[in-house]
Amino acid sequence: MDPNTKEVAHDFPPFFRLYKDGTIDRFFGTEIVPPTTDPLTGVQSKDITISPQTGLSARLFLPKTTSFSPKLPLLIYIHGGAFCVESPFSPNYHNHVSSVSAEANVVAVSIHYRRAPEHPLPIAYDDTWAAVQWMASHSKGKGPETWLNDHVDFERVFLAGDSAGANLAHSTARRAAVDGLGEVKIVGMVLIHPYFGNDQRSKMLEIIFPTMSGSDDPRMYPNKDSKLSRLGCSRVLVLVAENDGLKERGWTYYEALRKSGWSGAVDIMETKGEDHVFHLFNPNSENASSLLKQMASFFNQN
């Protein structure tokens, strides 16, 4: 054997390959684009560090508007990628969150949590919660980030995410009900093509979440959460796609939440003829435009 050839410990296409020496090859989602001002929409973006100790960071988006009085809703966005690929800085997610900010006229914060397998779950859950707490520290206008101090109405905060990010969004809303966020009010949550566990055993999940308590862990199996009714928001929109292998998991979540005794309103919409996170890969399509408008309408309901 060539002494320079690294031995593979685990191979999980299309996401990553883990070698026995601990190094990792990610197969996609590694490209990044800098923050900018969008020439078409006028949305500004910038990167901020939330925790220098852990590297927790985010990309902020500020829509172009003639007046910030009254202040704008805050969208906390959590990217997907199986907990292990992609970032807020990749072209797909930068463009998507920028488009949502423009369409819905919201300030958006896209969280860069630490990713598995180098940082196995539940680190991503804890990072997301830490980022939300950091944002909540601006509710009195005295936080370290001026865009949040000056332009955000903290009584109109929303969570959203796709795939694994939708999972993280749900767990954050669930934790907000238990631990609280002071004067911050999470109004609603949009889950796009959400990833939750099912009855099939996943070797990849064993690697990236070695401390998971089993097939009843509420973070991965919210439909089995006896306290699902304690969700820390009043409105939920679940978006699924007809040809997505995760479609039924979105429907299962919707039905479980609807029957849980939760006092809020949950709705579900299915896009015909589309696959998982189609809107990221074909953002100019009619269906992607429709999804964007569905999100904007949800954020702007009275």
Image (cartoon, rainbow, N blue to C red):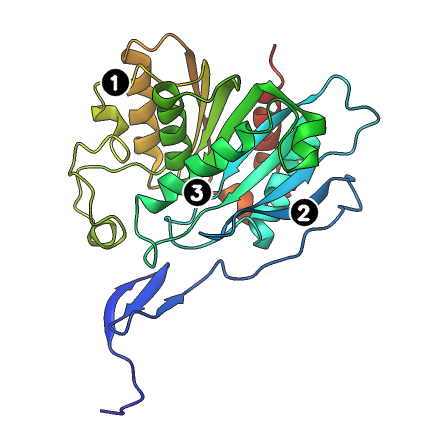
Q: Looking at the image, is 66 positioned above or below residue 61? A: above
Q: Amino acid at mark 2?
A: Lys
Residue at x-position 52% and y-position 36%: 77
From the viewer's perspective, is 38 left or right of 53? Answer: right
Along the viewing direction, whichever of 87 and 256 lies nearer the viewer: 87
From the viewer's perspective, is 295 left or right of 125? Answer: right
Q: Label 1: few (<14), some or many (≥20) within 10 Å?
A: some
Q: Nearer the viewer, mark 1 or mark 3?
A: 1
Residue at x-position 46% and y-position 32%: 272
Q: Label 3: few (<14), some or many (≥20) within 10 Å?
A: some
User: Which label belongs to residue 46?
Assistant: 2
Report the residue marked by disc 1: 227
Residue at x-position 22% and y-position 37%: 198
Residue 300, image x, y percentages: 63, 18
Query: Which is more N-terminal, label 3 or label 2?
Result: 2
Q: Quick check: can you spot residue 150? A: yes
